[in-house]
Image (spheres, rainbow, N blue to C red):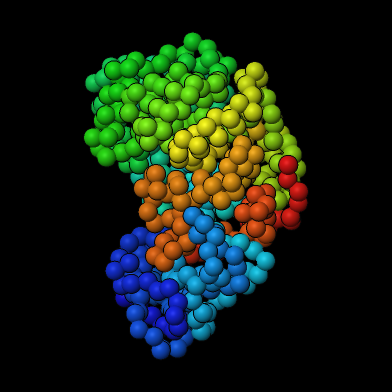
Amino acid sequence: MPARAIRGYDNATRVRRSDFSTRSTGNCYETMLAIRRRGCPGAKVIRTEAGRMSRATAITNVRIFDGERAISATTVVVGGARIEAVGPSVPRDAVVVDGRGATLMPGLIDSHVHTNMDGLHDALKFGVTTELEMMRHWSARRRREIAERNDVADLRSPGMGVTAKGGHPTEYMNSSSNLFIRFFYRFPSVSTPGEAARFVSRQVSRGADYIKVFIEDGSCIGFPGLPVLDDATLAAAVNEAHRHGKLAIAHITTAEGTQRAVDAGVDGLGHLFLDSPTHELIDNIATAHVFVIPTLVTLSTAYGNNAAALAADERVRSRLDKKWLDSLSRSMNVYPQGSLDNAYSSIRALRDAGVDILAGSDVSEPIPILGGLAHGASLHHELQLLVTAGLQPEDALRAATSTPARRFGLTDRGRIVPGALADLLLIDGDPLTSPTDTLSIRGVWHRGAELASRAVRGRRASTP
């Protein structure tokens, strides 16, 4: 259905007619027209297929981190589900949000989670507008539901991961809070290259956005001796993913497993190795253009560190229920000999080698053996640890916005530019100078819809 646009942007950055097409952008399909010429008074109005009229929203007087860098513009105009313009004067009759004293940035992307609908809901309260699932079967019906709702984060998923019989993560099934998984579910596995190729094709046919492979012998996670895929089977899975035009992401926790993943041709690593790498390994990762999702928060809890101080922060406590706060206050403690200082050194070496670093938490369920993590909150914690490791705040923010969007092909998000999805996070303070400010959330928009204030409120408090 055509939209009626009323324009008046002076010399603002405007979007072209070619920037938009009819597509699914939330609860309905919207056709958005951008008017090139100036002079007609009033605010832009969008008519949806449901017949609803929506005025433009102008977020004004705000510092803007556009996903790559801080920019000089101080106003962003949102029309429907997308960003209409960056830097204009305020259209007449627009809904104005005064962002004085705040920073506007793209909605965050958590590049490693294991989630459900409750997790997606919690994530959005923390400004995480996209979660990248790293293994779970989602039905086509549920995927459509997520794509049509603005009260939960968006989702991408690989479906089920490729693993050996009895391999990771089957060791966790006995502790799952899901009774079906605990007592009845038989985890799918492969044992030959042919089985691996067929398994990958089946995940793609079921809607997988990328493919996950497991290289985990259990030595660093408290379950030594786990079966792992052989090299030929691993390579077959990666090659089949690429044949279908999909990224292959490897679960690894050791330097040895990392080298096997790189040799097999994977595109990304779902963790940072818990043990110490060689300079040669860092160089090989960089040469192969493999990205790394360090999940420092998971390494920290694996080393025995809890996140009780994070749970005590009012900005976190006000958004999570007791089971998740209790979970944050525990730790996995499966590799107490590990060292965060060594992990930080690896982060700096990867950065210096030009490796893309993506922010991810590896949060899943609030069960005792997976303590120290929570949806949404742990991504903010990850950003803090990345800065502690040596990244500049701007680089850490890129790791949760434009960098994952680029590496995962999410071309409609991760940036504040005309035509992008209006997935936005408004923060009191300036995370480019004070990284902990990301938790001081004033507002969240998902596909242009502002999350109810009661979901995002939280007092500013100090964070370790």
Give the percent coordinates (x, y) of residue 159. 38, 35
- Could you tell me how many numbered marks the image carries? 0
Q: Is residue 448 left or right of residue 5?
A: right
**Residue 278 seen by the camera:** yes
Give the percent coordinates (x, y) of residue 119. 55, 43
- In which image quadrant can residue 459 be found? bottom right
- In which image quadrant can residue 244 be found? top left
Q: Quadrant of the C terminus?
A: top right
Q: Is residue 375 left or right of residue 257?
A: right
Question: Could you tell me which residue is drawn at 27 percent across and 24 percent down?
Answer: 236
**Residue 187 seen by the camera:** no
In-front residue for pair 336/153: 336
Give the percent coordinates (x, y) of residue 277. 51, 22
In-front residue for pair 60/70: 70
Give the percent coordinates (x, y) of residue 366. 62, 34
In this rendering, the answer to whether 11 lies above or below 161 is: below
Q: Is residue 456 left or right of residue 66?
A: right
In this rendering, the answer to whether 435 lies above or below 263 is: below
Q: Quadrant of the N terminus?
A: bottom left
